[in-house]
Every structure is written in C-alpha cells, then in structure tokens.
Image (tube, rainbow, N blue to C red):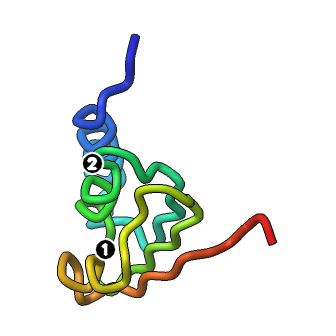
Amino acid sequence: GIWSHAKFEEDMKRFLKEDGIDGVDVVLNSLSHDDYIPRSLAVLKKGGRFMEIGKRGIWSHEQMFQARPDIMYEKIAADT
C-alpha cells in the first residue's frame, strides 16, 4: 500500500514512545515535498539538528527559525 504522510508521523511517534524516547536528535531530510518537513519537525527533540539534503521545496533558514527557533538547521550539498 501507499505510505501516507500521516502514517509516517504516526509510526515515528509510536517507535519513539515504545522506546521511551521524547524525540530524535537529528533529522537527515530529503523528503522536501508536501508536509514531510513539518512532520519531521514534530518528532525532532528540542535543541535538535535538522540537516537538509534535498534540493527542491526546501525551507529557508527564516522559515525554519519561525517554525522551530530552538533547532540548528543546515542545508547540505551532498553532490559537491
């Protein structure tokens, strides 16, 4: 079946709860379309790091700061 965006977030939250963890320390993201960025931010721990390797539909530093001023956000050019 198709793995929905809501299922992604639901599965991540379930995995974290099962392991007694309040969030992930780092997100290495390439899923920049639709709403994967906000869903990934929902499981990122306070003070975490969001590393973006996608090229299209990525957020600016300003957008990320508005959504989560507590995290470090970096765009990585993995192809250079």
Relative to residue 14, is residue 72 depicted above or below? below
Type of amino acid at the residue the image marks with label 2: Asp
Residue underneath mark 1: 45
Which quarter of the image is occupied by the N terminus? top left
Task: Tell me which corner region of the image, top left, top right, bottom left or bottom right, holds residue 43.
Answer: bottom left
Q: Nearer the viewer, mark 1 or mark 2?
A: 2
Instruction: Out of 39 and 26, give the one closest to the viewer.
Output: 39
The image's mark for residue 35 is 2
Estimate the spatial distance between the alpha carbons at disc 1 and disc 2, rounded to whole Å: 18 Å
Task: Please name the residue shown 49% across and 56% down the image.
Answer: 56
Give the crowd class for mark 1: few <14, some 14-19, many >=20 residues within 10 Å: some
Drawn side of residue 40 relative to residue 80, left or right:
left
> What SS does tag 2 mark?
loop
The image's mark for residue 31 is none
Task: Please name the residue shown 26% across and 77% down the image.
Answer: 63
Type of amino acid at the residue the image marks with label 1: Lys
Give the crowd class for mark 2: few <14, some 14-19, many >=20 residues within 10 Å: few
Relative to residue 73, is residue 40 depicted above or below? above
Looking at the image, tell me whether mark 1 or mark 2 is earlier in sequence order: 2
